[in-house]
Amino acid sequence: MKTRESALTFSQIITLVDTLARFHLKGEAQQYLLGYFWWILEPLLYVAVFYIVFEKLLQNRQPDFLYFLMVGKLTFIWFSKSINQAANSLDGSKGLMAQLNLRKEIPPLAVIQQGFYRQFVVFGFLLIFLVFNGYAVNAAWWWLIPLILVQALLTIGVGLLAALLVCVRLDFRLLIQLATVFLLFMSGVFWDLNAITDERLRHWLMVLNPLATLIDAYRQVLMLGASPNVGKLGWVLAETLLLLFLALFAYHHLQFWVARKVVSR
């Protein structure tokens, strides 16, 4: 017997996710005096804080550290903020969870879509800022398209799994927050991964942490005008597709369980 879970088509799911994302972004902006301007101001304030700490107080010797930090931190914020918000999305959508014909992936996907909209504006600002500070547009910038696509898929896969883990146990909410802090220091946001002299250690750090590879690739493209390492990106894509497959497989088989778990709290 066919259940009502399949009532929504793929295009309808995409439309609903986008509608929910834009609705929440509009409501969020209306709560603040500066509205949508916070999309750019918030990440720039993070960059300013870390720049003062590492450049002025700790006397960082990384060349062009401000631009180095901006590329790393703005990329990382997209991932970390999306994951933490997606992790809480199912538990914060009890009303939607009670709808039998609503796919349970929709709340976390809507949250992740909000992050896409914000990051589109932030990346636009970053590119303009780099150009005005002497970084010329070149052919290597075309690599931004696959890099952004891979990071988007990685964010979707990890975000869906994070939401599912929090659904299992609320304790995972705290663990996910701690994990993103750990990643902040292990992804080369403040330091150059290529400075690691132990080649084997550097290799495994980038293999086990796809975000570190992506941040390094963004810097190669935007700051050096060079193509990223295709082999490393291929490995990141393989990891990303595996995570995405696991997430979609889990949601496909746990639709009713997720609904019961969230609604019963």
Image (cartoon, rainbow, N blue to C red):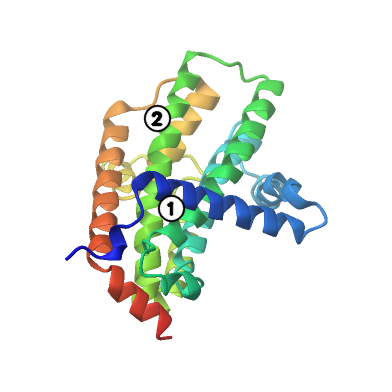
Along the line of sight, the residue nearer the viewer: 236 or 30: 30
- In the displayed structure, does residue 253 sit left or right of residue 148? left
Tell me, for residue 120, which label it has, or none: none
**Residue at the image position 42 percent from the left and 75 percent from the top:** 98
The C terminus lies in quadrant: bottom left
In the rendered image, which residue does mark 2 sit on? 146
- In the displayed structure, does residue 181 sit left or right of residue 74? left
Mark 1 Cα shell of 10 Å, populated few (<14), some (14-19), many (≥20): some
In the rendered image, which residue does mark 1 sit on? 186
**Residue at the image position 33 percent from the left and 57 percent from the top:** 7
Marker count (numbered): 2
**Could you tell me how far apart the alpha carbons at marks 2 and 1 are, in whole angstroms?**
23 Å
Secondary structure beneath disc 2? Answer: helix
Quarter residue 120 falls in: top right
Secondary structure beneath disc 1? Answer: helix
Q: Residue 85, percent across and down?
A: 52, 62
**Residue at the image position 43 percent from the left and 52 percent from the top:** 186
Instruction: Name the residue at the top extreme.
Output: 139
Along the line of sight, the residue nearer the viewer: 205 or 238: 238
Q: Earlier in the sequence, mark 2 or mark 1?
A: 2
Q: Which amino acid lies under the numbered mark 2 shown in the image of this protein?
A: Pro
Q: Residue 233, percent across and down?
A: 32, 34
Q: Residue 211, percent across and down?
A: 41, 46
Quarter residue 124 falls in: top right
- In the displayed structure, does residue 119 sit left or right of residue 1? right
